Amino acid sequence: MSNNASPGTLYLVATPIGNLDDMTFRAVNILKTADLVAAEDTRNSSVLFRHFEIKTPMTAYHEYNERTKGPELIQDLLGGKSVAVITDAGTPGISDPCYPLVKLAIEAGIRVESIPGACAAISALVISGLPVHRFRYEGFLPHKKGRQTRMLSLKEETGSIIFYESPHRVVKLLEEIKEFLGERNVSVSRELTKKFEETIRGPVSDVLAILKSKEHKGEFVVVIEGLSDRRRPNED
């Protein structure tokens, strides 16, 4: 039997990166009225659901099952269901699974809507004190293979550069910035929107010394000064 139902809508819903008060009214409404929520981690998202009294069914959608779960969600959408995608924190697709599903949805003629909200990269950039008119988002560096090559590829980048990093590797990242990019100004933010939010700004050597002197908790966003025109090598 053919299904003549109109396709549902795929919603990409941003969730708080720490402070639950940053959840938007529209995001709560979408999550309450969607037929299904595809969550990166259903256990983590259950906290959000309880807080906002959201009772919509959830299913897991993450990097380990996206190849099989994506087509299943597309079938739900083609059958007329509305599906909302959320990650553990922030905007879906920014260093989290989402791109393959969005691509499949577009190819299938399914409407895709972004429900904007928190994004750690943008939050850290606008408080960094570094230029915001042009920037390059890099997410997480590879742990080993390709790490140095990727860092060196940024040496001539003129816009501000944004990295995500774990507390275990943030010192290593700053050491690599100093080694491969030189003495740049940086801004390092952690625990954004949470009680112990902190941002350290200054030359990379100074920030590195501060970070080496303390223990680290929480995810970090590192913003690096781009190579300004006055510092670019003479191209003549």
Image: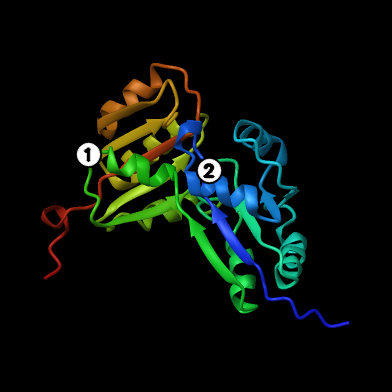
Which of the marked residues, 2 or 1, is nearer the chain's N terminus? 2
| Residue 189, percent from left and from top | 37, 32
Secondary element under disc 1, as helix, strand or loop, is: loop
Between residue 6 and residue 19, name the one nearer to us.
6
The crowd level at tag 2 (other Cα within 10 Å; few <14, some 14-19, many 20+) is: many
| Residue drawn where x is 47% and y is 22% of the image | 216
Q: Which residue is mark 2?
A: 15
Label 1 packing within 10 angstroms: few (<14), some (14-19), many (20+): some
**Is 174 on the left or on the right of 168, as rendered?**
left
Residue 63 % position (x, y):
67, 53
Residue 222 relative to residue 84: left or right: left
Q: Please tell me which residue is depicted at 64% across the width and 52% down the height of the picture.
A: 33
Report how many numbered discs are placed on residues in the image: 2
Q: Is residue 9 among the parts visible in the rendering? A: yes
Taking the spot 32% from the left edge, 44% from the top edge, the residue there is 125
Which of discs 2 and 1 lies nearer the camera? The answer is 2
Residue type at the position of mark 2: Thr
Residue 129, numbered circle: 1
Alpha-carbon span between mark 2 and mark 1: 25 Å
Residue 173 spot, x, y in % from top left: 42, 38
- Position of residue 210 measured from the top left corner of the image (x, y, whole percent): 33, 21
Left or right: residue 41 versus residue 124 is right
Q: Quadrant of the N terminus?
A: bottom right
* Residue 93: quarter of image: bottom right
Q: Residue at x 21, y 48 (%)?
A: 131
Q: Is residue 140 visible?
A: no
For badge 1, the amino acid type reads Gly
Does residue 202 appear left or right of residue 173 in this picture? left
